[in-house]
Each structure stands twice: as structure tokens, then as C-alpha cells.
Image: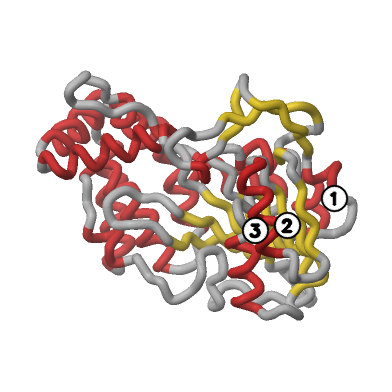
């Protein structure tokens, strides 16, 4: 058994032997043992990006730790299932590193996996692109679309659709991509069905705009309804809205089999849950994880789903 498998098996055995309360106690003790500067950095981060739950030692708010403990206890079999589906050991080591960061505040494993070789979403060793119909969900100011063109060239696509809900960044998006042909920008929320949604701006970080129960009214669409042509490449980074967006792209995934580039870090469940959704639609995806975040807390985690149709066996 290699060391990556050994470490992951040790961790899962450790977690299986503990109750949810014992896991939480372990995480809490590890957190409280961090330096004052480290705890301040954590608490400031979760105030800025509230996806994972509240965290404040002074106020005795430990929701973020409780959410981690619940996920590690209640969904350990889902994490194991994902580990078994991952294609390479870089991906498996990353999953181990994420869970060890949650459980033990292990910074070193994540640090060993930080690699700026390729642009985020476009690992050239995993993804080849040619004449794509690329859908960029959560296009922000066009950075991902521009990185796609930089990585694969201006002849690598036939059409690009960019979805962005924030009106401020939408104008920058249109300006940044206007010199390239065949790019359509849509100020619409991507979800499970057509309708109305409400946008809530993050007062601290504009890139963290989310959908909410109240706020600015905006049109909501499903990709199955909004794009009728075949799509070949689908990226999603919409601050926790990826689950609903995948549900609304079910027919494209089942019928078109686009390669998938999905952000899976906006809560403590998406990393296994979104894999489960995709796998329920289509079994012939090969899965990889790649990391574009920092060593302190695991963010910017991308699940690559590379479609690889199995040829029928010869008899």
C-alpha cells in the first residue's frame, strides 16, 4: 500500500472510531491551540466569506467547526466513495489534505499541493480543448474565459456563453471580452429552473455575490432551457449555487457529455455531493481534483469531470 492510500485509510479509520461530538471536540481543541494571529485570520476570513458558518472564539460561536464535524461524521462514506473514484494520486492526496485540514489543521499537505503551473480550471495534462462550446457560469469579469483563450488559443472555441449576475462586474465582463468573436454575455442567474431569483451583494468582496431570499430581482434560468445547442465544456463557480445549476443542466450532461470544471469548496458538502449528482446522470466520467487555493484553509478546489466513453468489448 502506498503512503497516500495508507494515510487516507488511517484517517477514515480514525473518524469511524469517533462520535460526532468527539470529532467536534478534537477539531475545537486543535483550533483553540492555534496562535492568536492564526485564529484572527480564520475568523476574519469566515466573516468575509460566510459560506462555511460563523466562527468567533470571543463570542463562543463555533458553527464552522460544528459544520466540519457533521460533514466528517455523517458523510464519511461519501468521501470514501469519491476517493475511490478519483483517477490519480494527486487528486487522492488532495482529498486527504482537505479532510486533514478540516480535522487536524494540517497546513503542510495542502501546501505541498499548491502548484501554479496552469491557470485555474485549465490543467493541460487533464483537459484538451478544440472547437469548444464553452459555458462559463459565474464569469465574474471574464478572467476564466480569458484564461481559457490564453491556455488553448483563439481557435479553440466555436462559441462561449458567459453568465454573471452582478451588474457592476457584468459591465467589466463585457468590456474585457468584447474584442473576441462569438462570446455571448448573459446577466442571468443559473439555477435548476427558469424563474426569478434575488441577488445579494457581499459588502466586503464583490466576487462573493450570492443568490438569496431577498435582494435585487434577477432572471433565473436553467442551462437546459437557456442553451439549446450542444455544449462541450462547462465551468461553474457561483458561490454555493453549483448544486442547483447542475440540476438545471441534467439533460446537457446526460446527452452532450461536456467536460466539467466545477468549484466544490463553498461549503463542507459540495466536494462529495456534486460528484454524486454528476455520477447519477452519467457513469462515464473520470474524476480529478485540483487545487488553486492557499495552504491555510482549502478553497479554490476544482472537480474535473472528464468524459471518457467506454468502448463496447469485442467478442
**On screen, residue 96 above or below 197:** below
User: Would you say the residues marked 2 and 1 are in contact, meaning their CB atoms lie under 8 Å apart?
Assistant: yes
Q: Residues within 10 Å of mark 2 (few under 14, many from 20)?
A: many
**Residue 112 coordinates in the image, percent (x, y):** 28, 67
Q: Is residue 277 visible to the viewer in this orientation of the structure?
A: yes
Asked where in the image residue 200 lies, by quadrant, the reply is top right
Seen from the viewer's position, the closer of residues 150 and 179 is 179
Asked where in the image residue 314 lies, by quadrant, the reply is bottom right
Disc 3 versus disc 2: distance between alpha carbons?
10 Å
Seen from the viewer's position, the closer of residues 279 and 164 is 164
Q: Residues within 10 Å of mark 3 (few under 14, many from 20)?
A: many
**Residue 145 coordinates in the image, percent (x, y):** 65, 64
Q: Which residue is mark 2?
A: 135
Q: Which residue is mark 1?
A: 227
Q: Secondary structure at mark 1?
A: loop
Q: Secondary structure at mark 3?
A: strand
* Lateral position of residue 10 relative to residue 197, left or right: left
Please tell me which residue is depicted at 63% across the width and 41% down the height of the picture.
166
**Residue 179 coordinates in the image, percent (x, y):** 74, 70
Question: N-terminal of the two: label 3 or label 2?
Answer: 2
Q: What label sits on residue 275 in the rendered view?
A: none
* Lateral position of residue 307 relative to residue 126, left or right: right
Quarter of the figure with the C terminus = bottom right
Q: Secondary structure at mark 2?
A: strand
* Lateral position of residue 99 relative to residue 225, left or right: left
Seen from the viewer's position, the closer of residues 313 and 264 is 264
Q: Which residue is mark 3?
A: 260
Amino acid at each position: 500500500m502506498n503512503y497516500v492510500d495508507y494515510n487516507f485509510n488511517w484517517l477514515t479509520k480514525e473518524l469511524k472510531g469517533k462520535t460526532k461530538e468527539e470529532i467536534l471536540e478534537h477539531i475545537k481543541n486543535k483550533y483553540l491551540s492555534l496562535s492568536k494571529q492564526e485564529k484572527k485570520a480564520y475568523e476574519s476570513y469566515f466573516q468575509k466569506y460566510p459560506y462555511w458558518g460563523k466562527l468567533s472564539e470571543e463570542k463562543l460561536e463555533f458553527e464552522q467547526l460544528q459544520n466540519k464535524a457533521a460533514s466528517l461524521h455523517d458523510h464519511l462514506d461519501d468521501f470514501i466513495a469519491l476517493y475511490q473514484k478519483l483517477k490519480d494520486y494527486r487528486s487522492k492526496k488532495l482529498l486527504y489534505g482537505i479532510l486533514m485540514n478540516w480535522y487536524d489543521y494540517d497546513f503542510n499537505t495542502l501546501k505541498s499541493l499548491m502548484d501554479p503551473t496552469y491557470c485555474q480550471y485549465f490543467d493541460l495534462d487533464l483537459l484538451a480543448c478544440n472547437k469548444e462550446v464553452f459555458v462559463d457560469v459565474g464569469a465574474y469579469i471574464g478572467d476564466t474565459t480569458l484564461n481559457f483563450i490564453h491556455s488553448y488559443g483563439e481557435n479553440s472555441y466555436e462559441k462561449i456563453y458567459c453568465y454573471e449576475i452582478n451588474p457592476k462586474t457584468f459591465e467589466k465582463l463585457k468590456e474585457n471580452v468584447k474584442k473576441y468573436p462569438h462570446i455571448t454575455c448573459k446577466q442571468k442567474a443559473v439555477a435548476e429552473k427558469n424563474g426569478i431569483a434575488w441577488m445579494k451583494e457581499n459588502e466586503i468582496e464583490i466576487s462573493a455575490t450570492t443568490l438569496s431570499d431577498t435582494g435585487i430581482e434577477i432572471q433565473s434560468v436553467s442551462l437546459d432551457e437557456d442553451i439549446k445547442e450542444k455544449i462541450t465544456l462547462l465551468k461553474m463557480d457561483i458561490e454555493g449555487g453549483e448544486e442547483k445549476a447542475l440540476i438545471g443542466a441534467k439533460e446537457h450532461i446526460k446527452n452532450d457529455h461536456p467536460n466539467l470544471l466545477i468549484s466544490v469548496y463553498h461549503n463542507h458538502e459540495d466536494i462529495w455531493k456534486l460528484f454524486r449528482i454528476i455520477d447519477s446522470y452519467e457513469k462515464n466520467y473520470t474524476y480529478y481534483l485540483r487545487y488553486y487555493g492557499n495552504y491555510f484553509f482549502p478553497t479554490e478546489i476544482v472537480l474535473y469531470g472528464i468524459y471518457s466513453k467506454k468502448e463496447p468489448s469485442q467478442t
